[in-house]
Image (cartoon, coloured by chain):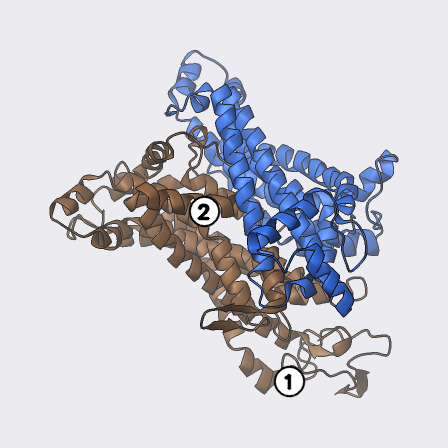
Chain colours: A blue, B brown
Amino acid sequence: MLRFLVRRLIGAIAVLFAISILVFLIFNVVPATNPAQRIAGKNATPQLIKSVEEEWGFDKSLPEQYWTQMKLIFTGQVTSYNSHVNIDERILEGIPATASLCIGAAIIWLAFGILFGYLSAIRAGGFTDRALTVLALIGISMPVFWLASILLYYLTYKIELFPSNGYQPLSNPWEWFTHLILPWISLAVLYVGFYSRVLRSSMLDVMNEDYVRTARAKGLSHRRVMTRHVLRNSLIPVITLFGLDFGAVIGGGAIITEFMFNIHGVGYFTAEALKNQDFPSIMAVAIFGAFFIVLFNMFVDIAYAYLDPRIRLGTQAT
Amino acid sequence: MPPESDKPGKEEAAAGAASSAGIGSGDPDLTFTGPESGEGRSAGPWTIAWRRLRRNWLALFALAVFLLIVLACLLAPVWANDVAHTGPNTTHTLEKLHEGGETKEVVEVTGKSIGPQWFAAGGKFFLGADGHLGRDEMVRLLYGGRASLFIGFTAALITLILAVVLGLLAGYRGGWTDTVISRALDVIWSFPVVLLGISLGIALAVGGLSIGPIHLKSSSLWIPTLIIGVVTTPYMARPLRGEVLALREKEFIEAAVAQGASAWRIMFIELLPNLISTIIVFFTLNIANNMLLEATLSFLGAGVQPPNSSWGTMISEGFEALYSQPLLTIIPGTAILLTVLSINVFGDGLRDALDPKSKVRFEARSGATAERSELAELSGTGV
């Protein structure tokens, strides 16, 4: 186990390093304009550009520039020249809202994804299955903007069923809850469709396994075989995917959902930075988001290796 | 990210072998229909696939809807010149519309623009006008669709070419070629698509792109196309590599090597035809996925740049006036939904027809396999 941990940790650090270089290249080498001007923002004075040039080390060699910029970002010294706020602080402030949104949505998508997938698989080929398959495809194809704008317009504006003014802190649980229901639904629909499909296929595969036949031969009830034997083993791919997706949602920030529902989390901050072409902010968010995902995936892998010894021993699971 | 193993080559080969079992053997329908097994024995693979697809009326209906949308967007200039008599960027701020005995302002003093007129004004402002500029929404929708479809299709083509070359090289060559390609793909893969897309998009939207002789203006449609094409490559290249790893152990490759065939010949003449069904399915589903990604990037200002417009930029503009004029957001949103849905339904049917056994099979315990990375891509591009 220790060897696996060390190996995994080294792998993660290597990927993090590669990602930080990739981000550096994207923002410093790829664009064909003066980098200091981009960092300083659209309405920068020549003096500001000059000082940015020094602070970010644009007069030095590329490796030195890389080192200076990463130091700025990781020591929390980087400020946005558009809005004059400390970017790392803004990101930290946004975390409660983003976490509330993502965790709530994740609960919804797991619960309904598993429910629909289960119903679909036990009635495979039947009417329920086909109806759920079509619904799942609609869910997968539905852009968040579309669903969010319809929910916002009809449910918060036309019939005023839900409040519309953004995120409320958890100190008032009821307000927090009612303000988050619609964002949760918007974010979860895609994954519900998706997870139900995955679980359905996985269950159909497991149903053909020998141990399921054995369980039936023992005389266990259909229901018991389905829940205890089939469903439990079919959940493995769903849990794996969940690790990946949850990491991506919380690290990448549900940018569009947060922006449309006016939830001032990390994603909203990103959207704002994009509209203002505020380069330092976007760079910091990209690096932190990617780092978070890599770390999260590593935790998932470790948990996974803990549960399944075959992975940490490196043997083939067949 | 999947659990990395000590011996990625060996593990993935085994995983790939398991998942590709449906292509080569096992499936009674396909037993005699490998591309190298000659004609004459009952029906060929394409005939069988077509028979399966023909029975799936839902998939065919979806294809018809998609083709209809493409046709409508291709005919955008006809609608603009002969029906609406205006262009996608022509403003009508101060104009009035005479209709029956009534006179309506295209844009009221409040900034609210005219709603859908259908054919009341002879096709002018069929879906109303957009925002305070008073541009014809229908004309913009058709032209925007051209941009969205162009990006979705061309980016999928770029992904296809890159992924096939990289997947074949990594899978067949092995050794350090494989190591370099796989590690590079891993880095892109561990970066969430949307974050990487907006980073590249915003960096290029400001300065444009110039690599050697190629200069792209920052407003060029090719910039989002290239970004989306490159960013989604690992999701196709990795599964292809896995399949190649499994295929290269097969007898027909051994036979080709024994005959003295060159590596290029083996890769593109022997291996490639065996990957076709995977490639077709990926390509189709990629178009849908790319269109969602384009809309996301454009909505955030990191995709299509003015003066061009796409469905994503239309939603972005419309959203600013969601409560006074919800249709300006809902119309382009519905256009995306319909297009993406029709592609997804058709792609699903296509997968059933071409390769029924591969359908979302997981080798989850052994880490990265084709299906998982495919799934990981298909989720999470539109949040």
Question: Along the line of sight, which residue is nearer the eye, B186 or B320?
Answer: B186
Tell me: residue B182, above or below residue A6: below
Dot 1: what SS? loop
Q: Chain under label 2?
A: B
Counting residues from the N terminus, which is met first, the one under dot 2 or under dot 1? 1
Which disc, if any, is residue B185?
2
Secondary structure, mark 2, is: helix
Residue at image position (62%, 34%) is: A110
**Residue A88: x %, y % from top left:** 75, 45
- Image depth: mark 2 or mark 1 in front: 2
Residue B326, visible in the rendered structure: no
- Left/right of residue A186 with respect to residue B184 in the rendered view: right
Q: Where residue B373 sits: x, y (%)?
A: 47, 42
| Residues at marks 2 and 1 touching, judged by CB atoms closer than 8 Å | no
Inspect this view and state whether residue B96 appears: yes
Pick whichever, B15 or B22, lies toward us. Answer: B15
Q: Quadrant of residue B125?
A: bottom right
Q: Residue lying furthest front in this view?
A: A60
Amino acid type of the residue that numbered disc 2 sits on in the rendered structure:
Leu
A261 and A22: which is toward the camera: A22
Tell how many labels.
2
Residue at far right of view: A172
Label 1 sits on residue: B86
Question: How far apart are the alpha carbons under marks 2 and 1?
Answer: 46 Å
Residue B19 lies in what quarter of the image?
top left
